[in-house]
Amino acid sequence: MFSHIMLGATDIEASKKFYDEVLGVLGYGPGVLNQSPTGKKRYFYMAPTGIFSISEPINEQPATGGNGSTIGFSVADEAQGDAWHAAGLANGGSACEDAPGIREGDNGKMYLAYLRDPSGNKICALHRIAG
């Protein structure tokens, strides 16, 4: 469904460090530097199904976390989700929402862990539990 997701970063190098670690837990390599046509730094994380990227805003305005926005990353199990969350906290992220754990609702049983990246963007690790 998606070709790519790009988030603005207030401190691109702090955000790169954060995403190198949390996405590294999921098996992805470090972000690859790319300069925009206006000279702004961007980092791309490649996956077989799409691209995740962070960027200095090209419009010279500050990057802000989208109120009500969340980007979710699939994790294999609770252990990987816990490692993802710990890597984020250790690399400039902050906890938000409830503590990592299993939730049950209309969409079934799932593991969720939430973080805010160094620029305030809300991200989530999610594992759907069969049953």
Image (tube, helix red, strand yellow):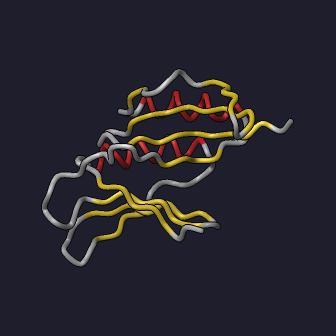
Q: Position of residue 49 (x, y in %)?
A: 63, 66
Looking at this view, is 50 or 97 the one in front? 97
105 horizontally vs 61: left or right? right
Residue at 19 percent of width and 74 percent of height:
38
Identity of the residue drawn at 31% across and 43% down: 14
Closer to the camera, 80 or 121? Answer: 121
Residue visible at 29% across and 48% down?
13
Q: Is residue 35 above or below residue 8?
A: below
Residue 96, by quadrant, is top left
Counting labels gives 0
Residue found farthest to the front: 106
Q: Nearer the viewer, residue 73 or 26?
A: 73
In the image, residue 2 above or below residue 86: below
Point out residue 110 in the picture as x, y percentages from the top left corner: 70, 34
The picture places residue 66, in percent across and down from the top left corner, at: 33, 48
Residue 23 percent across, percent down from the top left: 53, 47
